[in-house]
Image (tube, helix red, strand yellow):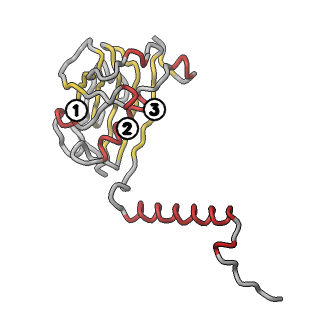
Amino acid sequence: MTQTAPRPLAHRPASARLRRAAALTLAAALAAGCAGGAGTEGYTSVTTPMHDTAYDPRQIFNGVPMALEVHGAPPDGAAPAQVAAGMTLPARFGASPFVLGEDLGEETRIVLVFDPARRLDGCREPASAGAGRADGAMQALVAYCRGQRELSSVQVRSTATRGPGDAGFAGAMNEAFQILLPIRGPDEQGERRRRP
């Protein structure tokens, strides 16, 4: 039985070259992630989205600043003003900035609770446990509220950022806002939602 030498790369079929190139690219990306290369550390997880039937993205106006209420602090200890300055709404809402407020009560606003003490009632009784996570991950409840009514909410956990003091914060929060503020309301999406 005779063995033939492998064909040079240029003579291999295009599909084989593409598979090999894809495998090398994936291996390089995984190696960079495992080595902790700049910008590749950590992950962001956005879970348990809830959308009330009253949620309507047409009520969020492009370029109009969104009121923000912050409870607790991110792992880096940033002040609420730094949190507000470190993020914007998604581009589809004109990348609108946030305007910080306290006890906004009946206003339409985003409520951000770091290390939430409980999952529900982000608009009625937001409370931070304030303990922080032992692993340093940022954990938050983000709710879009109209008065005491929670129009939508998500939970965020991120090891990619410790707060607005690093480059990963804006990206992590943008991921959260993409799910918190979808393009269509729940009646158009057929998703699980709260009853009025």
Badge 1 crowding class, 10 Å Cα cut-off, few under 14, some 14 to 19, many 20 or more, is many
Eyeballing the image, is 136 above or below 129?
Answer: below
Say which residue label 1 marks: 84
Residue 170 relative to residue 178: left or right = left
Say which residue label 2 marks: 156
- The image position of residue 86, as x and y in percent, is 24, 38
- The image position of residue 7, as x and y in percent, is 70, 78
**Closer to the N terminus: mark 3 or mark 2?**
3
- The image position of residue 122, as x and y in percent, is 32, 24
The quarter of the rendered structure image containing the N terminus is: bottom right
Badge 3 crowding class, 10 Å Cα cut-off, few under 14, some 14 to 19, many 20 or more, is few
Which residue is at the front of the view, 117 or 69?
Answer: 69
- The image position of residue 193, as x and y in percent, is 50, 20
Q: Mark 3 and mark 1: span between their CA atoms?
A: 23 Å
Q: Quadrant of residue 64?
A: top left
* Element on which disc 2 rests: strand
* Element on which disc 1 rests: helix
Q: Is residue 72 visible?
A: no
Eyeballing the image, is 6 above or below 186?
Answer: below
Badge 2 crowding class, 10 Å Cα cut-off, few under 14, some 14 to 19, many 20 or more, is many
Tag 2: residue type?
A: Val
On residue 47, the disc is: none
Which residue is at the front of the view, 191 or 28?
Answer: 28
**Closer to the N terminus: mark 3 or mark 1?**
3
Judged from this view, the residue extending furthest toward the front is 10
The quarter of the rendered structure image containing the C terminus is: top left
Q: Are marks 3 and 2 in contact (CB under 8 Å)?
A: no
Which residue is at the front of the view, 95 or 67?
Answer: 95
Say which residue label 3 marks: 48
Q: Mark 2 and mark 1: span between their CA atoms?
A: 16 Å
Q: Mark 3 and mark 2: span between their CA atoms?
A: 9 Å
Q: Quadrant of residue 187?
A: top right
